[in-house]
Every structure is written in structure tokens, then in C-alpha cells.
Amino acid sequence: MRVVLGEDLVLLRDGLIRLLVAYGFDVVEAVDNGPALLAALVEHEPDVAVVDVRLPPTFTDEGLRAAIAARKQVPGLPVLVLSQYVEQLYARELLSDRGGGVGYLLKDRVSDVTQFVDAIRRVAAGGTAMDPEVVTQLLASHVRDEPLGSLTPREREVLALMAEGRSNGAIGARLFIGDKAVGKHTANIFGKLGLPPCDDDNRRVLAVLAYLDRG
């Protein structure tokens, strides 16, 4: 799996490269600034991009802007964003085109190597991998929005776990409910969000985007 990495801190960048290579990823290019990241993403069209939000030269949202610009030139480019903090505006903007796998993890989650590697693979496959803290803050900000406001507290819990990329079985284990109950909740979520029957994985991503991409 081919990866382009955007990270300006030398020690973290080198550590991520070694980690990714150890788990069988091919880091085709690792860059330390926004313009170089955009060029690398467009040139290589990687299976997934792992991107720090704040890169030179502005140290604001340069990495995210480069990823968004690259997705316009390479539709569906999977992007996993790493950030020190929960940046709600950045998360919504990344999701605004609703194309390709997306993820948003806080940097301290990288210490959980298994979780981090799983998130990269899930995003590369077109899924979502949202940090629980990001999910919590975004959901709390928009719980009153319609049609999200029509979801029950349990349905919101299920949707939040879907955003983290968890399967029905994993959701059931976390909430101590059976597969049938999870299936019922997800069906209710799809119905309330107006998502017609189609491939379940696709609907799961659309359901997640429906509440994350709220302005």
C-alpha cells in the first residue's frame, strides 16, 4: 500500500516512516510543507495520504488545504489527518466533498500502533476512522440539527461508533447489545438520514458524513 506522508517534525516524521515500513506500507514520499505535499499527492496518487493539519509555511491549516486541493485533482484520494487538537472546522471542510475515505486522529493516538495502522488501512479502503474525541465534540455541537436531532440517544451512540469505523459486531460489544439490536438502530439511522437502500458500507460512510459535514 503506497503512502504519502506530510509531517514537519523530523523525529515524528522519521518515526512514522519506520513504523509504516515495518507494517508493510510503501512510503513513496515524505514531505515537511504544504506545497511539497500537494505536489507529492498529485504526482504519486497514493493509496492513502497521512497528513498533519499544520505544516509550513503558515503553520495554520496548510496540510489540510493541500489535501483538499489534491482531492480536487485526484478525486476520491483517501486522507487520514493527524492533529494535536480537535479542529471542528477542519474536519467539516475535509468531508465537504464526500469523496473517498477520510480519517481524523489526534496525534497521541499514534502511540497505539495497532489502532493507528488499522485506521490507515480502513481509510485507504474508502472507510472512515474518526478519533473518539473528535466524534464526541462534533456530535455534541450538532445534536440539535435536523435530521440528526431526530436520532435517539442510543442511535447517536451507534452513529458515533460507526464514525470511529467500528463494525456492527464491535458496536454491539461496546454497547452490550446484540447484532439484531445494532442492525435495527443502523436501519433507523439510515431511514432518518434519508439514505436509501444500497451497499451497507457505503451507507455507513454517508451516515457518518451526514453528521460530520454540518456547517
Image (cartoon, helix red, strand yellow):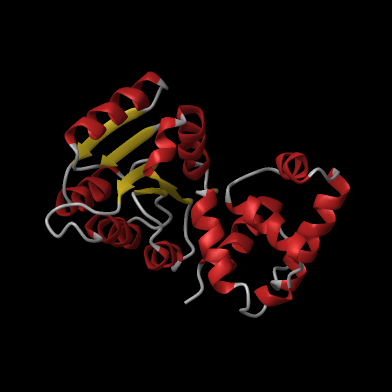
Above or below, comparing residue 90 to residue 3 in the picture? below
Residue 80 appears at what percent x and percent y?
40, 47
Quarter the N terminus occupies: top left
Asked if one can make out residue 90 in the rendered structure from this viewpoint, the answer is: yes
Q: Seen in the image, is 55 located left or right of residue 160? A: left
Task: Examine the rendering and report whether any part of residue 197 can be seen.
Answer: no
Q: Nearer the viewer, residue 156 or 120?
A: 156
Residue sitting nearer the eye, 181 or 49: 181
Determine which quarter of the picture holds residue 173.
top right
Residue at left offset 44%, top offset 39% = 109
* Residue occupying the point 67% across, 58% down: 159
Is residue 18 placed above or below 162 in the rendered structure? above
Q: How many callouts does the rendering have? A: 0
Question: Which x, y percent locates residue 175?
Answer: 76, 46
For the residue pair 70 and 142, the one nearer the viewer reads as 142
Q: Position of residue 81 (x, y in %)?
A: 37, 50
* Residue at point 69%, 43% (across, down): 167
